Image (cartoon, rainbow, N blue to C red):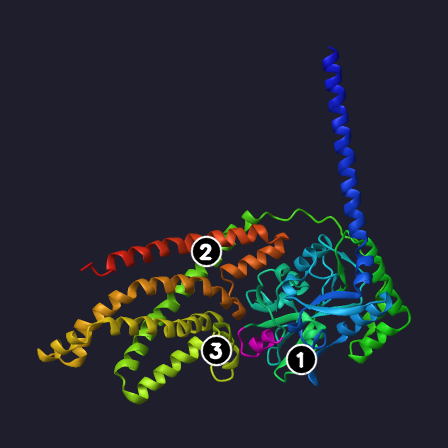
């Protein structure tokens, strides 16, 4: 009995020590988080995250001096930093991942047209708003039937991924959202008839859409506000930034900045309120609920890759034959093609094909994706076939010609079968690479597997689950192909002497 008593007493003391230790750790964590403002002041800089690609008037490179940044949010950041007694330091980050990067600690605050939505409030804390905006629906000027989203059932509407406008488009019955990463591309596609309408913030519409003579505003769909995002545990930093922003609003500095950029309107007089704390969000659907959408994205990936590879195989064969048998001019042209497409990024080629050539040749997103990847990989395939042709001994061609075959017949019956046999394992490996490079076509608004992953990551408010699911799909598609390539290499390898 005494032993049991001492054992129970020791167990209770152990539990008490554990509770005290957890409390100390939690208190230390809160203190470290609340000390963010002190660390910022000790460092001497307010590191704010944004995306230069957002363009004018948010944050962009000064046309007069490319080394400087300008924009109304640049001026707001400088005003905040000055009132906090530090210097503003810009950190470039993709707009789609500003919130995850803030959570990682890549910068102190996120300040770049971040719309306050329930999903974002669940992850970060927001200061008082610094700008009120409206969602402007833009259509072609000759399209008089559209006055709102209700008139767009069954139509494609362009917007930005992760935006409030996307939420509004998704909520509209029967409307298909077409996602873009830049602010000018949606209006280019609208002019070319690739989408029926574009819904974006009035700032963006006024600068990138409505100046085009072929477009008009069809009305306002909704309203929202921009605010500065701070990690939720850093209450001292939140209070400091919010207080600085309140001071800028009260002494008129914020209004002067907005007026200087022609952004002040009657909506701005309604901006009130203090820092918005994070709120509990409704439980988001788990990643597995998006598996059907991942399957759809994987199907697009496979179809695009197969069609592009067909173009690459045929185009590569033509290029290799042209370089070897086409004469001086034809061989030089084929060589220039190969060097051009191998020496420039495929992403650049896709942009030029889809957007750059749009005034001359308007291609659909899917067509441009297939043709762009096919043309790029044709350059690489041609090198495989060229190596295969050079591996066939010249004596076999000479023997065929001596037997009375024409050069074309000798090429078709003697040389090409052997060259293709040599090149086949490399072709299989290139198809695996093409399968993964197909992720780049998301810049053309094609929702393939990787694009679906980024969309799902925003919806479920996390990147790990969607990323692992996306990787599993890619692995399931590429692993059998890699096994096939190795098997072909073994079967087609020359027999040992």
Q: Secondary structure at mark 3?
A: helix
- Residue drawn at the location 76% of the way across and 72% of the way down: 73
| Rendered image quadrant of residue 119 | bottom right
Residue most extreme to the right = 251
Q: Considering only order in the chain, which callout, 2 or 1, is on the residue closer to the N terminus?
A: 1
**Real-space Cα distance between discs 1 and 2?**
41 Å
Q: Considering only order in the chain, which callout, 1 or 3, is on the residue closer to the N terminus?
A: 1
Residue where numbered disc 1 is placed: 210
Residue where numbered disc 3 is placed: 353
Would you say 267 lies left or right of 176 here? right
| Residue 223 appears in view | no
| Rendered image quadrant of residue 75 | bottom right
Residue 233, image x, y percentages:
77, 51
Residue 60, image x, y percentages:
69, 76
Give the prevailing secondary structure in the magenta stretch.
Answer: helix
| Residue 204 appears in view | yes
**Residue 187 lies in the magenta-colored region:** yes
Q: Considering only order in the chain, which callout, 3 or 2, is on the residue closer to the N terminus?
A: 3
Residue most extreme to the top = 1
Q: Nearer the viewer, residue 358 or 65?
A: 65
Would you say 493 lies left or right of 258 here? left
Tell which tag, 2 or 3, sits nearer the viewer.
2
Region of the chain picked out in magenta, as a range: 184-194
Residue 165, image x, y percentages:
66, 65
Tell which tag, 3 or 1, sits nearer the viewer.
3
Residue where numbered disc 2 is placed: 474
């Amino acid at each position: 009995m005494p032993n049991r008593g001492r054992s129970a007493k020791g167990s209770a003391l152990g539990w008490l020590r554990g509770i005290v230790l957890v409390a100390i750790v939690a208190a230390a964590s809160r203190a470290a988080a609340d000390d963010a403002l002190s660390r910022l002041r000790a460092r001497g800089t307010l590191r704010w995250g944004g995306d230069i690609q957002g363009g004018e008037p948010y944050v962009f490179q000064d046309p007069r001096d490319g080394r400087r940044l300008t924009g109304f949010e640049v001026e707001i950041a400088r005003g905040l930093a000055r009132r906090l007694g530090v210097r503003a330091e810009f950190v470039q980050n993709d707009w789609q991942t500003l919130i995850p990067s803030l959570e990682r600690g890549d910068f102190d605050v996120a300040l770049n047209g971040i719309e306050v939505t329930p999903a974002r409030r669940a992850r970060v804390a927001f200061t008082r708003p610094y700008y009120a905006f409206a969602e402007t629906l833009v259509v072609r000027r000759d399209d008089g039937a559209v006055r709102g989203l209700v008139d767009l059932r069954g139509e494609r509407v362009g917007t930005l991924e992760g935006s409030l406008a996307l939420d509004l488009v998704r909520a509209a019955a029967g409307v298909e959202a077409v996602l873009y990463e830049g602010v000018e591309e949606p209006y280019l596609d609208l002019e070319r008839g690739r989408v029926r309408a574009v819904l974006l913030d009035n700032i963006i519409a006024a600068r990138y859409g409505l100046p085009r003579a072929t477009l008009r505003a069809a009305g306002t769909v909704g309203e929202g506000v921009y605010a500065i995002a701070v990690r939720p545990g850093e209450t001292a930093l939140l209070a400091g930034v919010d207080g600085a922003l309140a001071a800028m609003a009260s002494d008129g500095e914020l209004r002067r900045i907005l007026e200087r950029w022609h952004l002040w309107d009657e909506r701005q007089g309604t901006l009130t309120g203090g820092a918005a704390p994070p709120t509990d969000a409704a439980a988001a659907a788990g990643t597995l609920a998006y598996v059907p959408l991942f399957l759809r994205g994987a199907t697009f990936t496979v179809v695009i890759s197969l069609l592009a590879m067909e173009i690459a195989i045929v185009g590569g064969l033509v290029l290799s034959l042209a370089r070897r048998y086409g004469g001086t001019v034809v061989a030089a042209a084929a060589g220039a093609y190969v060097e051009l497409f191998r020496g420039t990024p495929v992403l650049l080629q896709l942009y030029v094909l889809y957007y750059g050539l749009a005034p001359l040749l308007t291609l659909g997103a899917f067509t441009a994706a297939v043709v762009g990847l096919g043309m790029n990989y044709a350059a690489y395939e041609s090198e495989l076939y060229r190596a295969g042709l050079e591996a066939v001994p010249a004596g076999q061609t000479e023997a065929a010609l001596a037997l009375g075959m024409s050069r074309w017949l000798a090429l078709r019956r003697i040389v090409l079968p052997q060259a293709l046999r040599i090149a086949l394992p490399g072709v299989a490996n290139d198809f695996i690479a093409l399968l993964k490079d197909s992720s780049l076509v998301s810049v053309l608004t094609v929702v393939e597997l990787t694009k679906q992953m980024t969309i799902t990551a925003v919806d479920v408010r996390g990147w790990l689950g969607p990323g692992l699911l996306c990787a599993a799909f890619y692995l399931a598609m590429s692993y059998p192909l890699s096994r096939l390539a190795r098997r072909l290499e073994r079967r087609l390898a020359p027999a040992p002497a």
